[in-house]
Amino acid sequence: MAALIVGSLMVAAGLLAVTRSLSIIRHAARVWPRRIGTRDADLFLTGEFLVRYMGLLAAAAGVGLIISALV
């Protein structure tokens, strides 16, 4: 039962991270303490990719937990 709850929470958090990653990065760019250059833009792009990737991993792990709890 706990695996179903944890799995559902992981799926929800993962999908939220995937869909909201652009707004997270935009907020970080707004509060950046200095003028954004090419290197900083590359870092923000890499950060967005990592947020989406980790969100997909969390969602996949949640689906795996749900499936293992049901079997």
Image (spheres, rainbow, N blue to C red):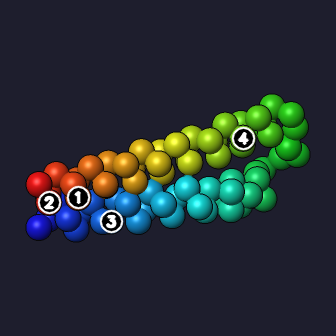
Quarter placement of the N terminus? bottom left
Q: CA distance from mark 2 to mark 1?
A: 6 Å
Depth check, mark 4 against mark 1: the one in front is: 1
Residue placed at 22% from the left, 68% from the top?
5
Mark earlier in primary sequence (4, 3): 3
Q: Position of residue 10 (x, y in %)?
A: 34, 59
Q: Nearer the viewer, residue 64 or 30?
A: 64
Q: Is residue 18 above or below residue 51?
A: below
Quarter location, residue 35: top right
Residue with the mark numbered 4: 45
Residue placed at 51% from the left, 64% from the top?
16
Residue with the mark numbered 1: 66
Question: Cβ–Cβ below 8 Å for labels 2 and 1?
Answer: yes
Residue with the mark numbered 2: 70
Depth check, mark 2 against mark 3: the one in front is: 2
Residue type at mark 1: give it.
Ile
Q: For numbered disc 3, what is the local secondary structure?
A: helix
Drawn side of residue 56 relative to residue 44, left or right:
left
Q: Position of residue 17 (x, y in %)?
A: 52, 58
Question: Cβ–Cβ below 8 Å for labels 4 and 1?
Answer: no
Residue placed at 42% from the left, 45% from the top?
57
Quarter location, residue 8: bottom left
Q: Is residue 9 above or below residue 25?
A: below
Drawn side of residue 11 relative to residue 67, left or right:
right
Q: CA distance from mark 4 to mark 1?
A: 32 Å
Drawn side of residue 71 relative to residue 64, left or right:
left
Residue type at mark 3: give it.
Leu
Residue with the mark numbered 3: 9
Mark 2, other Cα within 10 Å: few <14 / some 14–19 / many ≥20: few
Quarter location, residue 63: bottom left
